[in-house]
Amino acid sequence: MHFADSIAGITGETSGIGFATAKLLDQAGAHTVLLGRDIEKGEAAARSLTNGVFVQTDLSRGGDIPAIVNIGSMWAHQAVKATPSSAYSMAKAGLHALTQHLAMELAEYLIRANTTAPAVVETPVYEAFIPREQVSTALQGFNAFHPIGRIGQAGEVAHAVKFLLSDDTAWTTGAVLNVDGGVMAGRN
């Protein structure tokens, strides 16, 4: 998949899935536009890319949103008692619905809208509520939750995003792609 001369706008660009996606698309030749509020982190991330630029933007202001990459969640499809997260799940379910509505509303302009739905992926977001030195151990406790036997890595979700952005999926829009180690297929 080649992305030469294409432009990808990415949010959540300084760590985790967003940054892994930015690096992957940059390596494939895309011009990456990193969108966020934190100038210092955003510019540092852009400097680490060959064709990356940072644009400070507040995504809560509609007029500031030039480009969108949706990362949903397996929790939007299925509740898990071990991880009480009703508000998070509701927000991700809304994002899945938004993806489908955008697909319908933007199709006439040949704009496709898709999303991925990962399960447990090792990203820095867990440091917001688990002490940094305990994150790795805590996440390893979810290995058996996934039929594949391990949690995911940000780069694995980034590859799915790259696929959905490519011309290989030119006839795909409104899709929610499970990238979840088999969780939605079933569990032991």
Image (spheres, grey):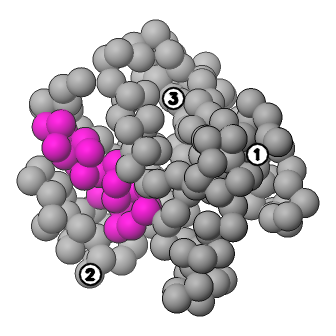
Quadrant location, the C terminus: top right
Determine if the magenta segment contains residue 162: no
Instruction: Name the residue beneath numbered marker 1.
Output: 76
Residue at horizontal 39 percent and vertical 67 percent from the top: 15
Determine if the magenta segment contains residue 24: yes
How packed mark 3 is, by other alpha carbons closer than 10 Å (few <14, some 14-19, many 20 or more), is many
Q: Amino acid at mark 3?
A: Ala
Residue at horizontal 59 percent and vertical 30 percent from the top: 177
Q: Amino acid at mark 1?
A: Ala
Quadrant location, the N terminus: top left
* Mark closer to the chain start, 2 or 1: 2
How packed mark 2 is, by other alpha carbons closer than 10 Å (few <14, some 14-19, many 20 or more), is few
Residue at horizontal 60 percent and vertical 23 percent from the top: 174
Residue 33 on image: x %, y %: 26, 52
Instruction: Name the residue beneath numbered marker 2.
Output: 40
Q: Amino acid at mark 2?
A: Glu
Question: Distance from label 2 to label 1 (Cα)?
Answer: 32 Å
Instruction: Name the residue beneath numbered marker 3.
Output: 113
Displayed quadrant of residue 130: bottom right
So how many labels did they put on this image?
A: 3
3 and 2 marks in contact (CB < 8 Å): no
Q: Nearer the viewer, mark 2 or mark 1?
A: 1
Q: Can residue 23 be seen?
A: yes
Displayed quadrant of residue 3: top left
Residue 187 on image: x %, y %: 80, 40
How packed mark 1 is, by other alpha carbons closer than 10 Å (few <14, some 14-19, many 20 or more), is many
